[in-house]
Image (cartoon, coloured by chain):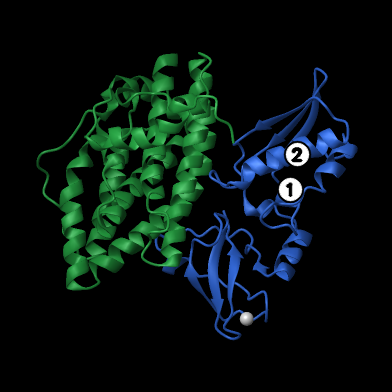
């Protein structure tokens, strides 16, 4: 992540833009803003997509542009980069806690499953409601591209898991 | 070389777009809710990958076209997706077998491409690989589950394998574009890819108690823009709106 000391006024504004699908996280919590720079009288905000097909990405761009415009930054350009690829490891610890309180089990850090089949990628995901680790995977594909569907075997509630990439 | 790189990138985008479109046709038709979400999420990943490849292709071409022009304003003969990707959905067995063949292909393709000397292709491949890893696992599981399921599911899977096998051959046919870029360290080596693909397919078919079909007639030509009759219908549906209302905006 780039130097946030350089243009703190812009970074502070970006910190107030929520993820449209998971409003407890800001776009800075997710780590998708890679750089803020001033080039030839233009503000260039560099972002990286979370999932290739994430429909929220267009929303992020619109939100960044309108937030900066509201605050009198007129000449803003958004640049998308793919390298290095986004990873859930960039979500900060404090944000992971907020995610769990919101009812979404946070990604278990640094555990991108390597197994060939889902059954080989078994890992301990904690139920965000009752905190039991006695949970099981229902589907690797949940309500959005970034989530898998789990159920808790103790409190019997289904819940979303923010999956690792 | 610019021309070859444009074509190579376009092909990657076309494979992702057409397969993504086919999967999107299943939206709301999944056998149950979770699988409906899986199919559409996979479709979304593919459409996102297509967008990234098209953006780069447009940049390489440098002729003022955008990613949308490439998706919506090219005729059939200028699409270079593998014929496998355009095959109709048919039953669930055909959807999953087509997906398994393509997931295995994409997985080993991106594994090589992430080391490409072309930095943009390498970056898109590294990103896509993370997503395709999930796709491959999902379709592998379906192969096994349905292959080892009931007599009927096994028979349907075997039929889908027999029907689609003829389209797998052209995955590994290299042309002048592949060869030129391979020498430059940009493209994937299709012979290595073929070896990995075969190993994976054999491994999963064995676990699924399914038979690897015999090699026989095989379709080719997509790298020259030759397609089966199905692609035209896909494009007609996909391109109708932007062609009829070229200035339409959301
Ligand atoms: Zn619970």
Where B89 sits versus A78, above or below?
below
Q: Position of residue B101 (x, y in %)?
A: 29, 48
Where B151 sits versus B43, above or below?
below
Chain where mark 1 sits:
A
Q: Earlier in the sequence, mark 1 or mark 2?
A: 1
Chain A tint in image: blue
The residue located at (45%, 32%) in the rendering is B241
Around disc 1, counting alpha carbons within 10 Å, would you say few (fewer than 14), some (14 to 19), or many (20 or more)?
many
User: Is disc 2 placed on a helix, strand or loop?
Assistant: helix
**Which residue is nearer to you in this view: B43 or B29?**
B29
The residue located at (61%, 79%) in the rendering is A133
User: Is disc 1 placed on a helix, strand or loop?
Assistant: helix
Q: Position of residue A88 (x, y in %)?
A: 64, 54
Chain B tint in image: green
The residue located at (63%, 40%) in the rendering is A58
**Which residue is nearer to you in this view: B240 or A149?**
B240
| Nearer to us: label 1 or label 2 | 2
Q: Position of residue B232 (x, y in %)?
A: 29, 32
Q: Are marks 1 and 2 in contact (CB under 8 Å)?
A: yes
Residue matched to label 1: A27
Residue matched to label 2: A64
Around disc 2, counting alpha carbons within 10 Å, would you say few (fewer than 14), some (14 to 19), or many (20 or more)?
many
């Amino acid at each position: 992540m780039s130097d946030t000391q350089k243009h703190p006024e812009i970074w502070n504004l970006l910190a107030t833009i929520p993820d449209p699908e998971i409003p407890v996280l800001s776009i800075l919590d997710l780590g998708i803003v890679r750089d803020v720079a001033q080039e030839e009288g233009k503000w260039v905000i560099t972002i990286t997509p979370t999932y290739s097909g994430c429909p929220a990405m267009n929303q992020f761009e619109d939100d960044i542009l309108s937030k900066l415009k509201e605050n009198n930054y007129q000449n803003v350009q958004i640049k998308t980069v793919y390298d290095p690829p986004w990873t859930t490891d960039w979500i900060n610890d404090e944000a992971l806690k907020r995610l769990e309180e919101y009812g979404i089990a946070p990604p278990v850090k640094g555990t991108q499953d390597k197994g060939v089949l889902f059954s080989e990628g078994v890992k301990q995901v904690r139920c965000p409601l009752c905190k039991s680790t006695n949970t099981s995977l229902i589907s690797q594909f949940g309500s959005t591209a970034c989530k898998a569907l789990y159920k808790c075997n103790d409190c019997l509630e289904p819940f979303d898991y923010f999956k690792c990439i | 070389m610019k021309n070859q790189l444009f074509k190579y990138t376009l092909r990657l985008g076309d494979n992702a777009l057409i397969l993504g479109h086919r999967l999107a046709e299943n939206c709301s038709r999944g056998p149950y809710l979770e699988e409906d979400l899986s199919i559409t999420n996979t479709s979304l990943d593919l459409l996102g990958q297509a967008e990234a490849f098209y953006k780069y292709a447009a940049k390489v071409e440098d002729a003022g076209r955008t990613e949308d022009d490439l998706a919506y304003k090219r005729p059939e003969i200028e699409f270079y997706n593998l014929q496998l990707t355009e095959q109709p959905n048919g039953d669930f067995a055909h959807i999953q077998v087509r997906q398994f063949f393509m997931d295995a292909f994409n997985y080993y393709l991106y594994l090589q491409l992430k080391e490409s000397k072309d930095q943009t292709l390498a970056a898109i491949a590294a990103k896509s690989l993370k997503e395709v890893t999930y796709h491959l696992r999902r379709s592998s599981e379906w192969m096994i589950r349905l292959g080892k399921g009931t007599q009927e599911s096994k028979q349907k899977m075997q039929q889908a394998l027999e029907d689609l096998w003829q389209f797998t051959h052209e995955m590994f046919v290299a042309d002048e574009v592949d060869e030129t870029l391979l020498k430059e360290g940009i493209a994937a080596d299709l012979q290595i890819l073929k070896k990995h693909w075969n190993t994976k397919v054999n491994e999963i078919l064995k676990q699924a108690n399914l038979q690897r079909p015999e090699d026989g007639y095989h379709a080719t030509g997509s790298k020259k823009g030759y397609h089966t009759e199905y692609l035209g219908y896909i494009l007609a549906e996909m391109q109708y709106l932007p062609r009829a209302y070229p200035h339409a905006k959301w």
